[in-house]
Image: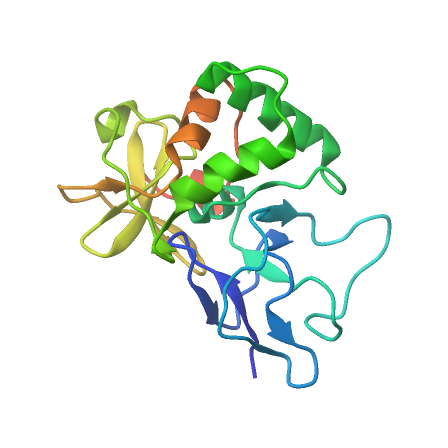
């Protein structure tokens, strides 16, 4: 039976047989004896996106009192939920993201802790996913941005939108009005040049 460890673009954690391209964590939020989630959905403001295998090591999921392994379809999904690249297992990506985040948000010499503090405000609204007004029209948003419309999540790619699912993306236009899922500061990092890794179905979906 699938564990409850798959993250949606809205940040919800659900059980599904699908896994994804990336893992990550929000601290310890599970009981290793039962391999089930606790009531809380985060225990630290550092919400990370990690590689599924690092230096030949793979973890047994939710089996010990350590960080809770979560899974994402792709990096765009993780960003939409409010995560960022890990400075340990994805150091080069994390440094590129921080540089783009600083450039896009007009700040310098930013610590990971300070970036997490901004993201934490942008990702949550009284414990639930915070939605933001669009800063521009959907077709002008940078690739990798995700929006929500009529309860569905959509990826912006090459000036069009693709509907998200646990299995991948499919061609579909986002109905108006749409709201921004990806934190605004992260969108500005995309505008400054960071390109999130997208699931292969994003390229395969017809426009």
Position in image of residue 120 (x %, y %): 47, 44
Residue lying furthest left in this view? Answer: 176
Q: Where residue 52 sits in the image (x, y, percent)? A: 70, 54
- Is residue 204 among the parts visible in the rendering? no
Q: Where on the picture, by quarter, is residue 62?
A: bottom right
The residue shown at (52%, 64%) is: 6
56 vs 86, nearest the viewer? 86
Q: How is the image coloured?
A: rainbow
Above or below — where is 122 with respect to 24? Answer: above
Nearer to us in this view, 167 or 57: 57
Residue 28 in view, yes or no: yes
Q: How many marks?
A: 0
Q: Is residue 49 above or below residue 19?
A: above
Residue 17: x and y in percent read 53, 72
The residue at the point 72 percent across, 29 percent down is 92
Residue shown at the point (59%, 53%) measured from the top left? 44
């Amino acid at each position: 039976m699938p564990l409850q460890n798959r993250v949606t673009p809205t940040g919800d954690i659900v059980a599904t047989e699908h896994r994804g391209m990336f893992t990550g964590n929000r601290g310890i939020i599970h009981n290793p004896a039962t391999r089930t989630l606790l009531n809380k959905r985060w225990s630290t403001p550092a919400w990370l996106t990690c590689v599924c295998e690092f230096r030949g090591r793979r973890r047994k999921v939710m089996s010990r009192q350590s960080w809770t392994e979560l899974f994402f379809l792709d990096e765009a999904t993780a960003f939409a939920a409010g995560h960022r690249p890990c400075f340990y297992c994805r150091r080069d990506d994390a440094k590129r993201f921080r540089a783009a985040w600083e450039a896009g948000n007009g700040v310098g010499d930013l610590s990971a802790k300070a970036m997490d503090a901004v993201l934490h405000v942008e990702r949550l609204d009284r414990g639930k996913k915070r939605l933001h007004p669009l800063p521009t029209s959907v077709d002008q948003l940078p690739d990798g941005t995700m929006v929500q419309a009529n309860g569905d999540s959509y990826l912006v790619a090459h000036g069009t939108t693709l509907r998200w699912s646990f299995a991948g993306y499919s061609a579909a236009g986002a109905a108006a009005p749409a709201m921004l899922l990806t934190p605004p500061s992260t969108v500005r990092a995309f505008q400054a040049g960071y390109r999130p890794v997208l699931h292969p179905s994003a390229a395969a979906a017809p426009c």
